[in-house]
């Protein structure tokens, strides 16, 4: 059942004093139950579960009005400000960023042991100080997400809260299993405005996801400004272009660059996708010359797939694709450019091969690494190309052959990680063509044992796509993503040996009050004992 909770309503609920369980000068013992504000979290309450957790008996670290944040290197400054901004509204503490001694301070420093790698961190929580070490800003940012989760859930409220702000004592050493942990948002079927995309970036980043793939074009709409082909967004981004005529809109280049910068501050890389050569009715209906017969088809807002294709035999097709790739590559500091390639059923295998043979090198020409849905593995691939497996079967020979040839694979098996699949038969939103996916289905599998011929070392990462045929609002997005997205984030970050459905259920339950504090609309799965 859908539980509609607006941000506003939740903020109001959280501000009610009756929910404040303990007085400010009477610290509650760590680990005690009771009021949401009373107990310190336990050191292993984190999602994704860290690689190594060593609790320490005795007092944790108590944040007070005098606690400072220290950034030992200039490069740690930005993350220090993010930590300050995350904790200030709810604690009401100034958390001044400065130098001075390490006592009663949270120190951020870039001198971590090499073993944490570029994305990992070490967190030491003692009674008199907290030390977060990493080798990069990304590692510090990941550690800050852990610190947030080790404070009482109401720390995530944006209004002043009364609570004991105690971090449990101990040490965490953490690093990701896979370097690429992603979410995908389809802004083509229904456009989602920059503010909604930013909200989603914040939500995924707190679970240490570091890529957001934007599906920018499809049969229904074209959602990114291309200067050389200006009618694309004028017509195919305009009124009536979302599924069922709802959800029109597009990103200007400025919007897109703002999103890229916003994401980068949160150590999230945007991966743009232009779906080619199929899923292109929006372009075909805008520019007649892209059709083999020179006639533009009517725009379409239904949810059929597999009927459209750019004309593979015309030169203008490759001028079009090159212009698009060039302009998008210029907006994209990240390494990847996704060229779709799925469900090109209106194209013969030979035409598909001809098309990809010309388009894959264009991505390289503009300095990017091509990603494509796994159908691209049917053609000869450059060494660095990344097929994204979205099937439901345990075998996909082309993808296995690509892995054997050294290409890295992005794992998105639709019956495990498609966030647009219904949870159960009562879910109003979404589809069920691949499966109904309850939280346990999303969590309880191993990416390295999912696809024949694709093992741990062949996998670049895991990505959770959210297609938007049935989604209208940010509330809809949140409802389909939570709680499955954190489950998939853990699958992609945590060592397989540390993952366990039973302990995950307990840790996930503790995220519920956090989402309530944040105003996130989530599915209260009956598989989880929500507090
Ligand atoms: C498929 C299809 C998309 C749909 C989605 C819906 C891929 C890669 N192509 O996934 O066009 O939106 O399913 O679940």
Image: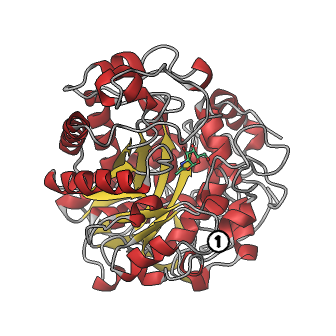
Q: Nearer the viewer, residue 184 or 83?
A: 184
From this view, report whether residue 233 is shown above or below residue 373: above
Q: Nearer the viewer, residue 508 or 62?
A: 508
Q: Position of residue 212 (x, y in %)?
A: 42, 50
Quarter of the image where the N terminus is located? top right
Q: Give the residue displayed 33% in from the left and 79% down from the top.
A: 406
> In this rendering, would 349 be left or right of 518?
left
Q: Nearer the viewer, residue 298 or 240?
A: 298
Q: Position of residue 45 (x, y in %)?
A: 63, 69
Residue bearing the label numbered 1: 42
Q: Give the residue displayed 37% in from the left and 28% down from the top.
A: 283
Residue 98: in sight, yes or no? no
> In this rendering, would 250 be left or right of 326?
right
Q: Give the residue displayed 34% in from the left and 32% down from the top.
A: 292
> In this rendering, would 35 be left or right of 410?
right
Q: Position of residue 478 (x, y in %)?
A: 62, 42
């Amino acid at each position: 059942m859908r539980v509609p909770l607006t941000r506003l309503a939740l903020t109001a609920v959280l501000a009610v004093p009756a929910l404040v369980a303990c007085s400010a000068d009477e610290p509650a013992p760590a680990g005690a139950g009771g009021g949401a504000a009373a107990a310190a979290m336990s050191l292993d309450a984190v999602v994704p579960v860290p690689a190594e957790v060593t609790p320490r008996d005795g007092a944790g670290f108590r944040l007070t009005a005098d606690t400072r944040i220290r950034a030992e290197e200039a490069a740690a400054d930005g993350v220090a400000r993010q930590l300050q901004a995350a904790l200030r509204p709810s604690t009401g503490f100034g958390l001044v960023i400065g130098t001075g001694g390490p006592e009663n301070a949270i120190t951020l420093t870039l001198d971590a042991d090499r073993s944490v790698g570029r994305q990992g961190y070490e967190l030491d929580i003692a009674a008199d100080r907290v030390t977060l070490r990493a080798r990069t800003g990304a590692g510090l940012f990941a550690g800050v997400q852990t610190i947030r989760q080790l404070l009482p859930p109401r720390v995530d409220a944006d209004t002043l809260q009364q609570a004991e702000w105690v971090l449990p004592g101990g040490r965490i050493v953490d690093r990701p299993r896979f370097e690429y942990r992603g979410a995908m948002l389809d802004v083509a079927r229904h456009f989602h405005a920059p503010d909604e995309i930013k909200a989603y970036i914040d939500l995924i980043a707190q679970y240490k996801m570091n890529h957001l793939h934007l599906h920018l074009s499809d049969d229904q709409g074209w959602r990114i400004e291309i200067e050389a082909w200006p009618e694309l967004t004028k017509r195919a981004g305009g009124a009536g272009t979302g599924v069922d005529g709802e959800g029109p809109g597009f990103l200007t280049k400025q919007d897109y660059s703002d999103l890229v910068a916003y994401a980068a501050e949160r150590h999230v890389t945007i991966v743009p996708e232009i779906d080619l050569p199929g899923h292109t009715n929006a372009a075909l209906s805008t520019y007649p010359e892209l059709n083999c017969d020179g006639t533009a088809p009517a725009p379409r807002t239904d949810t059929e797939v597999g009927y459209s294709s750019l004309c593979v035999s015309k030169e203008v097709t490759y001028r079009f694709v090159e212009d698009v790739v060039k302009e998008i590559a210029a907006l994209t500091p990240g390494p990847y450019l996704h060229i779709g390639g799925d469900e090109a059923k209106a194209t013969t295998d030979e035409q598909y091969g001809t098309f990809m043979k010309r388009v894959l090198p264009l991505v390289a020409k503009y300095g990017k690494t091509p990603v494509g849905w796994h159908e691209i593995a049917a053609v000869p691939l450059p060494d660095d190309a990344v097929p994204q497996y979205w099937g439901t079967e345990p075998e996909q020979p082309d993808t296995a052959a690509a892995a054997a040839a050294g290409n890295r694979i992005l794992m998105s098996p639709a019956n495990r990680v498609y966030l647009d699949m219904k949870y159960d038969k009562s879910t109003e939103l979404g589809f069920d063509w691949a499966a109904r996916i309850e939280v346990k289905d999303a969590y309880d599998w191993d990416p390295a044992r999912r696809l024949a011929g694709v093992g741990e070392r062949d996998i670049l990462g895991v990505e959770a796509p959210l297609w938007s045929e049935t989604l209208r609002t940010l509330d809809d997005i949140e409802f389909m993503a939570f709680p499955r997205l954190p489950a998939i984030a853990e699958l992609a970050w945590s060592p397989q040996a540390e993952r366990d459905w039973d302990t995950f259920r307990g840790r996930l339950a503790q995220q519920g009050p956090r989402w309530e504090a944040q105003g996130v609309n989530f599915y209260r799965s009956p598989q989880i004992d929500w507090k």
